[in-house]
Amino acid sequence: MASKTVEAVLFPGIRRQGPFRSSGQNLTTAGTYIEMASRVTEPVLLGLAVLAVRNRVKR
């Protein structure tokens, strides 16, 4: 029950199946946490890549 509350707070618009998964299968607990972690880290890594390119272009 608590994990569903945490997911609802962290990702209010995303159901457990996610917006891009069309198979309709539910994830395991580990899969859910991996997906949550990837949703946080992917934009961070993309931002760092943009900053790295920007830094190279400025020189």
Image (cartoon, grey):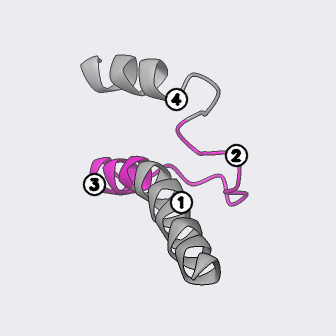
Name the residue carrying label 1.
Answer: 47
| C-alpha distance separating marks 4 and 1 | 20 Å
Q: Cβ–Cβ below 8 Å for labels 2 and 4?
A: no
| C-alpha distance separating marks 3 and 4 | 17 Å
Instruction: State which mark lies toward you, 1 or 3.
Output: 1
Which residue is drawn at the image coordinates 50% and 49% (left, top)?
26
Instruction: State which mark lies toward you, 4 or 1.
Output: 1
- State the SS at label 3: helix
Name the residue carrying label 4.
Answer: 11
Q: Using the image as rendered, state which of residue 39 and residue 5 is in the foreground.
A: 39
The three-letter amino acid code for the residue at tag 3 is Ala
Which part of the image, by quadrant, shows the N terminus?
top left
Which part of the image, by quadrant, shows the C terminus?
bottom right
Residue segment shown in magenta: 16-37
Q: Where is residue 24 shown, x and y percent of the image?
A: 65, 52
- State the SS at label 1: helix
The three-letter amino acid code for the residue at tag 1 is Gly
Instruction: State which mark lies toward you, 3 or 4.
Output: 4
Name the residue carrying label 3.
Answer: 30
Question: Residue 56 lies in what quarter of the image?
Answer: bottom right
